[in-house]
Image (spheres, rainbow, N blue to C red):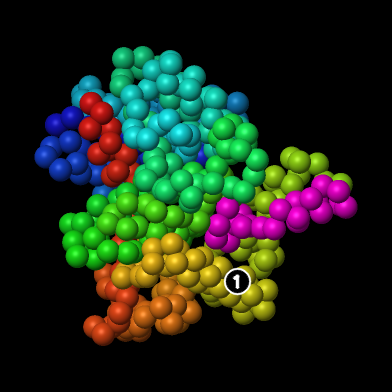
């Protein structure tokens, strides 16, 4: 069997993975996750058709990353039928100002990435733990970091600055942008499938549990809704998005909430979940008849349209709009509602095309071309990993 590359996307309680065969164009041959980390870890792998081809449970909640990643690598070796795994690529949330592209991971790079933890305290440690675990159990295996921030290094300086005293910017307090691997994949796909549109002014809406918008001009990021952290911008599944800083001061001074409790509230108890009081899952909210669920959906759409209008201003106009990620790819009612609010910009949606999740959902005479493009961050991780090797 040809060589293979493993792509990893680590979160606080799970590690998603995808295994790609490298023979010409990389082909995904398996995907899965290790979930329940810290409680009762459960590993499951599926082939391209979705059939379960590997499964394992650990009853001990204290099992560490070395044991979990070691088990994953053993399964990969067995599945490949030999020692053909040539590298592991990792999605790392924050690359700061210095990592403008993928990086081959070693102790020096890891130390530099550790220093960025204050910029992403809830994400960076989880991104780096699997790296160290694999270094321990398979020290000779090359590993590559692929950063969610790198794609946004084309942002002009005016789009990265906060109106704060300059010493804070010198410390790294600035707008970075995230979901870069997804936006890079969409930009590359547009260049291949719609080169004229790709050369123009396009807003991409990455709408999943985490959500953001990115303004592309000739395929490069010029503005985005996420800023210093992945908490900023759009309303999300459990995150509040943009909020008046005075609300934080109110929580601190009037409610006397500790910083850790405010952090939990903003990251885990807000967004669709907080407003609806029901769920962070858009599918559940769209099926619900409760007024709170309806209000959460309306606010989600309102915030998307408002931020899109701002990005159209940054672009100086709009030629295309792309929906991607879980909600963007599958929630036709959300796409319809967003397009209705953006009609003043020249968006005219084809309801029939939208209802069947067609590649293009705008009418033939729409001034703004609207597309639905499935994203593939794992494919971008593999491409970057191969480029580094």
The answer to whether residue 44 shows anywhere in this view is no
Q: Specify whether residue 233 is painted magenta.
A: yes
The part of the image, by quadrant, that contains residue 143 is top left
Name above or below for residue 61 compared with residue 155.
Answer: above
Q: Residue furthest front?
A: 166
Q: Residues within 10 Å of mark 1 (few under 14, many from 20)?
A: some
Q: Position of residue 275 (x, y in %)?
A: 67, 66
Give the residue at x 31% y 70%: 319
Judging by the rendered image, the residue that carries numbered circle 1 is: 299
Quadrant, the N terminus: top left
Task: Give the residues in magenta.
Answer: 232-255
Q: In front here: 236 or 174?
A: 174
Q: Position of residue 168 (x, y in %)?
A: 62, 36
Q: How many marks?
A: 1
In terms of secondary structure, what is the magenta stretch mainly?
Answer: loop
Give the residue at x 32% y 58%: 217
The answer to whether residue 184 shows anywhere in this view is yes
Instruction: Please tell me whether mark 1 sits on a helix, a strand or a loop.
Output: helix
Quadrant, the C terminus: top left
């Amino acid at each position: 069997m040809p060589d293979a590359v493993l792509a990893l996307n680590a979160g606080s309680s799970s590690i998603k993975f995808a295994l790609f065969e490298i023979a010409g164009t990389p082909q995904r041959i398996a995907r899965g996750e290790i979930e329940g980390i810290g409680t009762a870890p459960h590993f499951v792998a599926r082939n391209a058709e979705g059939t379960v081809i590997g499964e394992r449970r650990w009853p001990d909640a204290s099992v560490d990353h070395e044991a979990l990643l070691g088990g994953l690598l053993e399964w990969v070796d067995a599945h490949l039928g030999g020692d053909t795994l040539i590298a592991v690529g990792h999605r790392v949330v924050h690359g700061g100002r210095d990592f403008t592209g993928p990086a081959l991971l070693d102790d020096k790079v890891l130390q530099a990435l550790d220093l960025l933890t204050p910029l992403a305290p809830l994400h960076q440690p989880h991104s780096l733990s699997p790296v160290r675990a694999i270094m321990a159990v398979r020290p000779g295996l090359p590993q590559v970091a692929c950063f969610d921030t790198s794609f946004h290094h084309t942002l002009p300086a005016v789009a990265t600055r906060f109106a704060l005293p300059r010493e804070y910017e010198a410390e790294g307090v600035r707008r970075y942008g995230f979901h870069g691997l997804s936006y890079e994949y969409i930009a590359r796909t547009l260049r291949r499938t719609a080169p004229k549109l790709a050369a123009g002014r396009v807003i991409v809406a990455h709408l999943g549990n985490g959500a953001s918008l990115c303004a592309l001009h000739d395929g490069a990021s010029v503005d985005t809704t996420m800023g210093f952290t992945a908490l900023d911008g759009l309303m999300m599944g459990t995150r509040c998005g943009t909020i008046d800083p005075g609300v934080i001061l109110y929580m601190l001074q009037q409610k006397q909430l500790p910083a850790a409790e405010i952090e939990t509230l903003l990251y885990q108890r807000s967004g669709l979940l907080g407003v609806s009081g029901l769920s962070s899952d858009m599918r559940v909210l769209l099926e619900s008849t409760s007024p709170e669920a309806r209000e959460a959906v309306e606010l989600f759409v309102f915030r998307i349209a408002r931020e899109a209008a701002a990005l159209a201003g940054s672009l100086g106009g709009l030629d295309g709009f792309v929906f991607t990620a879980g909600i963007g790819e599958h929630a036709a009612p959300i796409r319809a509602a967003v397009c209705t609010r953006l009609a003043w910009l020249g968006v005219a949606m084809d309801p029939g095309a939208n209802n069947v999740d067609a590649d293009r959902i705008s009418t033939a005479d729409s001034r703004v071309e609207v597309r639905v493009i499935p994203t593939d961050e794992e494919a971008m991780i593999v491409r970057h990993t191969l480029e580094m090797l």
